[in-house]
Image: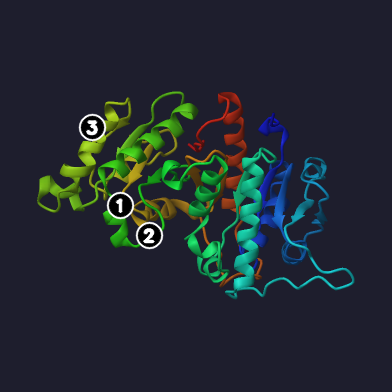
Amino acid sequence: MTESPLSLPIAITLGDPAGIGPETIVKAFRDAPDLTRGCFVVGDVATLRRAAGIVAGAGVALPVALLANVQEALHCPPRCVPVWQITSAALPGEPPPPPSPFGQLSAKAGQLAGDCVIWAANAALRGEVAAMVTAPLNKAALSLAGAPYDAYPGHTELLQALAAAHVKTTVAQLPVRMMLANDELRVVLVSIHVSLQQALAAVTFDQVLQSLLITHHALQAVLGRAPRIGVAGLNPHAGEGGLFGREELDIIGPAVLAARAQGVLASDPIAPDTVFMRARAQPGQPGEFDVVLAMYHDQGLIPVKYLGVDKGVNVTLGLPLVRTSPDHGTAFDIAGTGRADASSLIEAIRVARQLCKTRCAAGAGDTAVLNK
């Protein structure tokens, strides 16, 4: 019998130690002490102490504490950064290895980032932590680390594989989708980290229908009603009745009809240059749709990021665990300067906490973002 998620700590993975992840993590503990109480970092003490030295100031102490067990994180004082050391810091009698150099791509950094994700995901799947919040990793560094990491383009695919193995099924039988959201817009993607050519090939009846069903079930529990899903077309003007492509007529439209037959409130395919504006929520003026289903990665992420990377949160739908992350990358160019903005990570922690409460109230289930 696992404990209630509300009584468990939240794991924050280190991200690539050569990037801005450690700095944003320490800033989150510094700037949002109430929100980060009960959180801990899966990572490396030396890397986080270096980050604390960079962002500390104005008389604010940022101690970095090594945990003997993760439950200790629930009792750490505000602005203390508890760390679960994912690898042995050093052999007995030897000094600890230095942190990875800032801004440098390396297999060592990719290995550490990947190891943190695997540890946190397995802990979440076993019910030992309430949720995982992932700081950004570098996909090239992850690939350099070799097996098993070079088989996965990023967090989402790695987490899907780990979850499938845990529930003893295949990856194909555990479909997941990426949702990016901020205060104004939610977007779910049909495909994620593939080439544009592969993304176009992924716009099939089954993929679109599956995406609509995952989105519907993930948001329904939170909203208390069926979400209104705006469906983006693939082609300019949503194909203009077949003049600019037939995907809307032959694939997307039929998938929408099949989803509607199962209770999904999905629109007909809408021109992708207008659907996001129609879904955008503004103060005192909710959008026409609760979420937009985008046909490929950049179609959906450009409008979300344009509206504000600092408040964007990535949520993986379909996993048997809560996973959120900030909506930005490793930013090697500013790593170590103290200029990294922790707003998106703070928002990701906030959303993770809300999702845990929702899962408790609903007896667990699909993850869904609570923004807006």
Query: Which is nearer the N-term, disc 3 or disc 1?
Result: 1
Task: Name the mark nearer the viewer: 3 or 1.
Answer: 1
Q: Quote the CA–CA distance across marks 3 and 2.
A: 27 Å
Q: Residues within 10 Å of mark 2 (few under 14, many from 20)?
A: few
Q: Residues within 10 Å of mark 1 (few under 14, many from 20)?
A: some
Q: Residues within 10 Å of mark 3 (few under 14, many from 20)?
A: some
Find out whether the residues at labels 1 and 2 contact each other: C-beta distance under 8 Å.
yes
Q: Amino acid at mark 1?
A: Ala
Location of residue 32 with respect to 254 vertically, above or below: below
Residue, x 15% and y 49% (percent of image)?
Answer: 246
Q: Amino acid at mark 2?
A: Val
Q: State left or right for residue 167 relative to residue 39.
A: left
Residue, x 44% and y 28% (percent of image)?
Answer: 220
Q: Which image quadrant is residue 35 in?
A: top right
Q: State left or right for residue 136 relative to residue 237.
A: right
Q: Amino acid at mark 3?
A: Leu
Can you identify the residue that label 2 sits on?
A: 194
Can you identify the residue that label 1 sits on?
A: 202
Can you identify the residue that label 3 sits on?
A: 257
Query: Which is nearer the N-term, disc 1 or disc 2?
Result: 2
Residue 182 location, x and y as percent? 48, 45
